Image (cartoon, grey):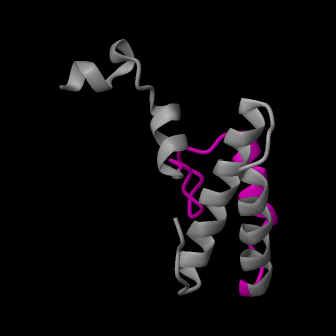
Amino acid sequence: MCSELGPEGGLLPDYIMEAAGTSLCSIDDYVGCSEKEVAYVKKHATSDRSKIDAQILRLQGMVEGKMQPDLKIWIKQRLAILKSYQKNLGGKVEL
């Protein structure tokens, strides 16, 4: 089973994270974050609950639109980061 889910089997970690709407990027210590994700994490480090919620709603509205695959992945990465903040603020994380 591991060989079926691994890179040889075609299910790469990026695809799995995209499909699950999650990210390896840690907002606490930036482990697993790309430079782009680190910049986004830092941008929202001081955001309050209402700003986080508003950004989640905005991005959720955009994610179903037609766009290039790399832009859709970036939206999903931002959503995962914002949902991490939302969870830390004691909120409900909608997947």
Q: Residue furthest top?
A: 8
Report whether residue 9 is seen. yes
* Lateral position of residue 51 relative to residue 28, left or right: right
Q: Position of residue 45 (x, y in %)?
A: 73, 71
Compared to 43, does 24 lie above or below?
Answer: above
Q: Residue furthest left?
A: 1
**Residue 46 visible from this viewpoint:** no
* Residue 39 place in picture, x, y as percent: 78, 52
Residue at image location 77% in from the left, 56% down from the top: 40
Q: Give the image location of residue 73, x and y in percent.
A: 67, 40
Front residue (pair 84, 30): 84
Q: Residue at x 59, y 84 (%)?
A: 89
Which residues make up the magenta segment? 23-49
Q: Is residue 25 magenta?
A: yes
Which quadrant would residue 84 be assigned to in this image? bottom right
Q: Is residue 84 magenta?
A: no
The part of the image, by quadrant, that contains residue 55 is bottom right
Q: Is residue 92 left or right of residue 79?
A: left
| Magenta stretch: helix, strand or loop mostly | loop
Q: Residue at x 56, y 64 (%)?
A: 28
Please identify the quadrant where the N terminus is shown: top left
Relative to 90, is 39 on the left or the right? right
Left or right of 56 in this view: 24: left
Residue ID at (24%, 18%): 3
Above or below, 10 relative to 61: above
Circle count = 0
Quadrant for residue 29, please give it.
bottom right
